Amino acid sequence: MIRKQIAAANWKMNLSLSQAETLADELMKSEIKLDIHQQVILAVPFPYLTAIHQKVNHHNHFHVSAQNCAATKNGAFTGEVSAEMLRDIDIQYVIIGHSERRAYYHETSDILVEKINLALEYGLKPIFCCGEPLSIREEGTQNEFVAHQLKEGLFHLDAEQMKHFIIAYEPIWAIGTGKTASSDQAQEMHQYIRKVIADQYGHSIADTVSILYGGSVKANNAEDIFSKPDVDGGLVGGASLVASEFSTIINSLKSIIL
Ligand code: PGA
């Protein structure tokens, strides 16, 4: 069973349109080698989705993602963008439950469940984020914390919906801090996440789920982190804004046939 190895860029609320287009152009021009089971996902700000999609669309392994979608289908929700709208402009992925959304926009598990259900209803693939804050890591209860996030956010899904799902484990203490989890810490948590999924859905489903690591992934640590058996690539913030850094990160994806 082959699961996708994925380098996902999370541009967050950065870059002008021309900077964003230049970055996409530079990535397209850089020497990127991708196998059939490796892919790149660029999660870009809403206003740039169409422009960046048009730029990378011809490349089989490149896809564009939104960073969020609304928890409601449509209606009087000023400022929101629905899953259906994203589908209409041919976007295939959406990040759901990033720790910044959970913390700054008070997105609870109930809200995330609504978003995931709408994303799936409209044919989008969610990239579901989980991860513990520093206090929990220091307490040593990170496994329970992450298992709880997975159960609350995902375990209403059936096995078919869970197949080939994408999860990003992003310890909050490592996001934007320059402090990365060691590759062993990442592997330990990823293996645990896969076990939690296997306990619920069985090994054959759990083995299809791509589990990305996020939190200060850089060109100089990606290969070590991605080399771990349960780490299927990364969700990259800061380092994804520099074409040379991100192309090295893409080329650090491991090539495996499971
Ligand atoms: P970072 O962000 O790579 O800048 O730590 C990762 C993320 O928040 O997805």
Image: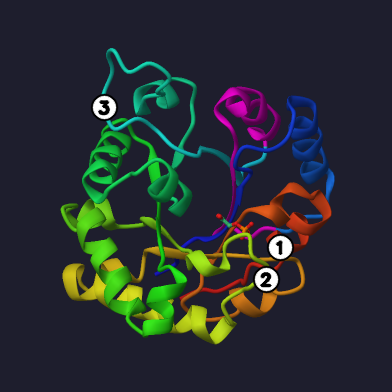
Q: Position of residue 188 (x, y in %)?
A: 44, 84
Instruction: Name the residue that disc number 3 marks.
Output: 72
In this rendering, would 5 be left or right of 162? right
The residue sitting at 43% across, 82% down in the picture is: 138
| In the image, residue 181 above or below residue 112 | below
The magenta region covers 34-58
Q: Which of 120 and 254 lies nearest the eye of the viewer?
A: 120
Query: For numbered disc 1, what is the local secondary structure?
Result: helix
The residue sitting at 77% across, 72% down in the picture is: 220
Q: Position of residue 116 (x, y in %)?
A: 29, 42
The residue carrying mark 2 has its beta carbon less than 8 Å from ligand 1: no
- The reply to whether the C-beta atoms of the residues labelled 1 and 2 are less than 8 Å apart is yes
Q: Which quarter of the rendered picture does the N terminus lie within?
A: bottom left
Q: Earlier in the sequence, mark 3 or mark 1?
A: 3
Quick check: is 229 in the magenta stretch?
no
Whether residue 20 is visible here, answered yes or no, is yes
Tell me the amino acid under the disc marked 2: Ala
- For label 3, the crowd category at 10 Å Cα-Cα, with few meaning under 14, some 14 to 19 and many 20 or more, is some
Q: Quadrant of residue 122?
A: top left
Instruction: Name the residue that disc number 1 marks.
Output: 249
Q: Which of 187 and 177 lies nearest the eye of the viewer?
A: 177
Q: Which of 133 and 35 lies nearest the eye of the viewer?
A: 133
Query: For numbered disc 2, what is the local secondary structure?
Result: helix
Q: Earlier in the sequence, mark 1 or mark 2?
A: 2
Instruction: Name the residue that disc number 2 marks.
Output: 222
**Label of residue 189 in the image:** none
Q: Nearer the viewer, mark 3 or mark 1?
A: 3
The residue sitting at 64% across, 65% down in the picture is: 177
Q: Position of residue 150 (x, y in %)?
A: 27, 62
- For label 1, the crowd category at 10 Å Cα-Cα, with few meaning under 14, some 14 to 19 and many 20 or more, is many
Q: Which of 214 and 13 lies nearest the eye of the viewer?
A: 13
